[in-house]
Structures are given as structure tokens and as C-alpha cells.
Amino acid sequence: MDIELLFKIAAIGILVAVLCQVLVRAGREDQAMMTTLAGLIIVLSMVIKEISTLFNSVRTIFNL
């Protein structure tokens, strides 16, 4: 796992938090919730790829 992944996740989190605050202040709570969910889905897809790589590495190491 690279440090780049952590920076990407942090950047997405900051961006989503700012957008959410702007949308809430503008009275668009529904769009703020959708923005939060979209950010969560993006981060989860990035993490799932890394977990898949981890499982493949473990499988290769132990010859499973």
C-alpha cells in the first residue's frame, strides 16, 4: 500500500466535507447526502482493490 492511497482518500474526504457544508448551507440537504454517499463509494472501491491485491498476495505466498 502506497502513501499515495492515503493522500487520495484524505483529499476525497476533504473535498466531500467542503461540498457537503456548502450544499447544506445552501439548503440542499438531499444533494449533500448524495455527495457524501458518492465519496464513500469512491473510497470503498479504492480500498476494495487494495484488499483484493492483499488476498491474492496471501494466496500466492501460502500456495492456496
Image: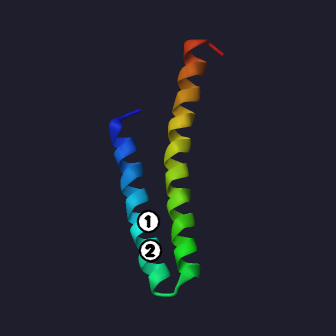
Residue 54 position within the rendered picture, expressed as x and y whole percent measured from the top left: 53, 28
Please say if the residues under marks 1 and 2 sit with CB atoms less than 8 Å apart.
yes
Q: Residue furthest front?
A: 25
Taking depth in this image into account, of 24 and 43 the one nearest to the observer is: 24
Q: Amino acid at mark 1?
A: Ala
Which residue position is annotated with label 1?
17
What separation in Å lies between label 1 and label 2 (alpha carbons)? 6 Å
**Rendered image coloring scheme:** rainbow
Residue 58 position within the rendered picture, expressed as x and y whole percent measured from the top left: 57, 20
Placement of 34 over or under 64, stated as above or below: below
Quarter of the image with the C terminus is top right
Instruction: Tell me the residue at 60%/12% (across/down).
Output: 62
Quarter of the image with the N terminus is top left
Instruction: Tell me the residue at 56%/80% (across/down).
Output: 29
Residue 4 position within the rendered picture, expressed as x and y whole percent measured from the top left: 33, 41
Q: Amino acid at mark 2?
A: Gln
Q: Please, what secondary structure does the residue beneath circle 1 have? A: helix
Placement of 27 over or under 44, stated as above or below: below
Place residue 12 in its image quadrant: bottom left
Placement of 37 over or under 46, stated as above or below: below
Taking depth in this image into account, of 6 and 52 the one nearest to the observer is: 6
Q: Residue furthest bottom?
A: 27
**Disc 1: CA contacts within 10 A as few (<14), some (14-19) or many (>=20):** some
Q: Please, what secondary structure does the residue beneath circle 2 have? A: helix
Q: Residue 21 shows which numbered tag?
A: 2
**Disc 2: CA contacts within 10 A as few (<14), some (14-19) or many (>=20):** some
Residue 11 position within the rendered picture, expressed as x and y whole percent measured from the top left: 36, 55
Place residue 48 in its image quadrant: top right
Instruction: Tell me the residue at 39%/69% (across/down).
Output: 18
